[in-house]
């Protein structure tokens, strides 16, 4: 699967790396990997750099088409109403990673951020998560203090 992106000009299309020219691995859940493998099996034989998702004619899906048509259809099929934007889903994923206890550096890597400051803007922690972390920290500190007593 290609990690590149494509942009269309008046005369042609240009394939390349993501917007920051930095190729990265994106962590996927095993169930997502399995679903992508199954989807790939349903396609005609292609090379490993071919797009995983294509238009009904088999051509590359352009970003504007994806946002305007394909994503809307997928959201409708999933019963998402109101329809989120891909950017909102990105923020949601970052927040869920944080709630699951991922270190901010891992979240930054998954999102392709070069700076923790950028990642911090994506992470919307929940009050319950704050309380759970406060309690965990209190227990760790208490154990450390008790362990040092003579």
Image (spheres, rainbow, N blue to C red):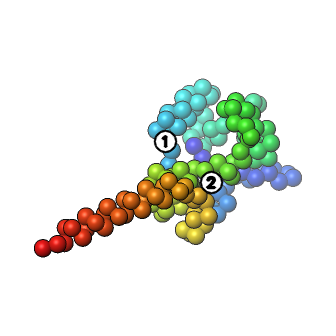
The image quarter containing residue 16 is bottom right
Q: Residue at x 60, y 50 (%)?
A: 92
Q: Residue at x 57, y 50 (%)?
A: 93
Q: Which residue is mark 2?
A: 91
x then y, percent, for residue 36: 55, 35
- Crowding near pointer 1: few (<14 within 10 Å), some, many (20+)? few
Q: Nearer the viewer, residue 11 or 147?
A: 147
On the rendered image, what quadrant is the C terminus found in? bottom left
Which residue is situated farthest in the right direction here? 10
Q: CA distance from mark 2 to mark 1?
A: 17 Å
The disc placed on residue 29 is: 1
The spot of residue 33 in percent (x, y) is 50, 38
Q: Quadrant of residue 54?
A: top right
Residue 61 visible within the image:
no
The tag earlier along the polypeptide, 2 or 1, is 1
| Residue 21 drawn above or below residue 55 | below
**Res. 69 mark:** none
| Residue at screen point 73% across, 32% down | 76
Q: Closer to the observer: label 2 or label 1?
A: 2
Q: In this view, which residue lies farthest toward the top? A: 42
Q: What residue is shown at x 79% (from left), y 38% (from top)?
A: 69
Name above or below for residue 108 compared with residue 56.
below
Looking at this view, is 79 or 41 the one in front? 79
Percent coordinates x, y for residue 80 in the rendering? 69, 36
């Amino acid at each position: 699967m290609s990690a590149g992106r494509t942009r269309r000009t008046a005369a042609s299309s240009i394939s390349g790396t993501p917007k920051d020219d930095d190729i990265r691995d994106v962590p996927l859940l095993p169930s997502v990997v399995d679903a992508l493998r199954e989807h790939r099996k349903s396609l005609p034989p292609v090379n490993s750099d071919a797009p995983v998702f294509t238009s009904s004619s088999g051509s590359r899906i352009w970003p504007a088409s994806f946002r305007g048509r394909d994503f809307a259809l997928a959201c409708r099929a999933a019963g998402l109403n109101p329809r989120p934007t891909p950017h909102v889903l990105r923020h949601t994923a970052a927040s869920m990673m944080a709630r699951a206890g991922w270190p901010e550096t891992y979240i930054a890597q998954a999102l392709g951020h070069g700076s923790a400051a950028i990642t911090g803007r994506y992470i919307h922690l929940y009050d319950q998560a704050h309380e759970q972390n406060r309690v965990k920290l209190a227990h760790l500190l208490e154990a450390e203090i008790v362990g040092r007593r003579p």
